[in-house]
Amino acid sequence: MTVPVDPDAPEAREWLIRELSKREYAEAQPNWFDRLASALWEWLSSLRFEPGAGGQGLGVLLVVLLLVALLVAAFFIFGRPALSRRSRVTGELFGDDDARDAAAMRRAAERSASAGLWNDAVTDMFRAIARGLAERTVVTTLPGTTAQDFAERASRAFPEHRTALTASADDFDSVRYLERDATRSEYERVAALESALRTARPRLDAVGAGSEGSRS
């Protein structure tokens, strides 16, 4: 038996925002190449060649062939249109210039953990958390953002993970600045946190909160 659902306006708006905030919707948005390819295809489809057009028809045909060649070249350079892509976020992260995405940082942390290099494993996994939330536009990291500042703002979006976020930020600072050696248990904690946050839904009123906060 189906139960009818008739939400009021505020509740319906909240449902819509929650649904559209899912990662798959953001990644499916068309980029400039998608829009260009679509516009060119519509223009090509609208062309009509009249019998006896002569040189004019040949000129249009040459233009069409040139545009097709450009589209093919763009396909190989930029990739398949409408392919889901995660937003590219690079730049300074906790004082270091780092061009890796969250997945690359996570893999580096896992390799370090396999080799027993717990310092690198802990710091890279914490960076993977920060870069991952930045890629999802949940918490934006800026030049000068500290691990503690990030943890505080991430806790607003994921209050249920506040304790683990604070502890992992403390571990990161201790390893990076106080030259304390990390442990396996600290790595396992930050790795579990990274895995949980990767699929966790943030509080709607906290999304984008990372653009504010303290600088150091």
Image (spheres, grey):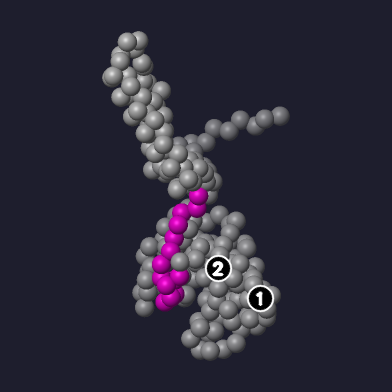
Disc 2 residue crowd, few under 14, some 14–19, many 20+, Cα 10 Å: many
Residue 127 % position (x, y): 52, 70
Residue 43 % position (x, y): 36, 26
Query: Is 89 part of what is drawn in magenta?
Result: yes
116 up-or-down from 209: above or below:
below
Residue where numbered disc 1 is placed:
113
How many numbered marks have been drawn onto this rendered protein structure? 2
117 up-or-down from 99: above or below:
below
Residue 83 % position (x, y): 52, 44
Residue where numbered disc 2 is placed:
105
Tell me what residue is drawn at x 37 percent, y 34 percent.
Answer: 67
**Amino acid at the residue labelled 1:** Ala
Query: Is 27 part of what is drawn in magenta?
Result: no
At mark 1, the secondary structure is helix
Q: In this rendering, would 168 be left or right of 138?
A: right
87 up-or-down from 6: above or below:
below
Tell me what residue is drawn at x 48 percent, y 58 percent.
Answer: 135
Tell me what residue is drawn at x 60 percent, y 76 percent.
Answer: 121
Label 2 to label 1: alpha-carbon separation? 12 Å
Which of the 4 image quadrants contains residue 142?
bottom left
**Considering only order in the chain, which callout, 1 or 2, is on the residue closer to the N terminus?**
2
Q: In this rendering, would 54 be left or right of 93?
A: left
31 up-or-down from 60: above or below:
below
